[in-house]
Image: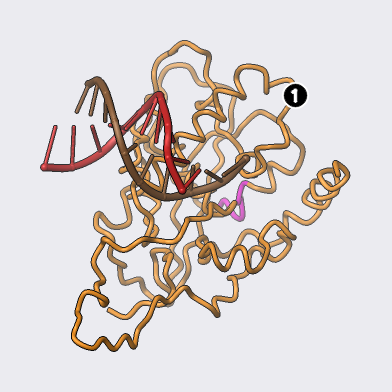
Chain colours: A orange, B red, C brown
Amino acid sequence: MREEDSNWFAKWEEELPSPEELIPLSQALITPDLAIAFDLHRDNSNSGQPLPQTTPPQPNSSTEFAGDSTGDEPARTLKRPRLVWTPQLHKRFVDAVAHLGIKNAVPKTIMQLMSVDGLTRENVASHLQKYRLYLKRMQSGGGGGGGGDSDHLFASSPVPPHFLRQTSRQSSDLFIPSFVPISTQQQHIAAPPSQFLHRQMSAVNFTSPTKATDQAMFLVRQQSQVQQPVFRPSSLHLHNQVANYTQDLESGAKTGLTLFPTRDD
DNA sequence: AGAAGAATAT
DNA sequence: GATATTCTTC
């Protein structure tokens, strides 16, 4: 039973740094049905590749109703399928929170930063609540243990130090959102097809050497011109390095991720 | 009124 | 256990 854990972890370490993992985040969202169908927690080796979106939960498009129009209501009163928080999606979540700072990291803002089409504030709120509990748990006694086995999802994404501050507020979080939401609304923005959209997020490198694993997760692909982050803690300068997350948004595809691959607007 | 957060429910 | 939904408070 536990062997599996060791296994996937070991495997994880070796296979993580592959470019595949670093490239596209275009498929951050998977429909629950799909997730279940493909049995997600199988192997992340190919998680970089967009999942085969062959069977979207397309409710219905034909929908011929004999006299009743209540059936075809694209309204918002429809029940969305359960959201599955994949490691990719969670990563995006953590990034957003990290760059907003704990203070500004509220569901709405996080949601906007993530700019995932279909993602609701409630989705984020729920996840945030759980994530906070995880952080708290980690502060209590998780530090030594290094992590339980019940938080695989959260463990899949490194936790910025700012999240784990002492139980007291040192100097609050003086974080300046170094970048603006892709779109205030939930519309897709037109992106130059031939242009890479590198959303550069700045964050401090965590000093917790959980092994090369963590580093692998920092999508440090290239550090050509690292734009000095806007935020600059003039005061205490921790001995942390400034790593830059580079979120590769799909080039040429929809800039905003979408929960629902099939859309007919 | 609307959003955040905690408490519950599925 | 993971998400959703409800409830309370701001």
The image quadrant where one finds the N terminus of chain A is: top right
- Estimate the x, y position of residue A67 in percent, counting from the top left: 18, 86
Q: Which span of residues is magenta-colored? A: A218-223
What is the three-letter code of the residue carrying label 1?
Gly
What's the residue at 50%, 42% (across, down)? A94
Neighbour class for label 1 at 10 Å: few (<14), some, many (≥20)?
Answer: few
What's the residue at 36%, 77% (across, down)? A263
Q: Residue A176 lies in magenta, yes or no?
A: no
Name the dominant secondary structure of the magenta segment.
loop
Q: Secondary structure at mark 1?
A: helix
Is A50 situated above or below A210? Answer: below
Residue at which label 1 appears: A145
Is A223 situated above or below A230? Answer: below
What's the residue at 54%, 76% (across, down)? A53
Is A24 situated above or below A66? Answer: above
Q: Mark 1 belongs to which subunit?
A: A
- Estimate the x, y position of residue A233 in percent, counting from the top left: 42, 24
Q: Is residue A18 left or right of residue A222?
A: right
- Estimate the x, y position of residue A119 in percent, counting from the top left: 38, 56
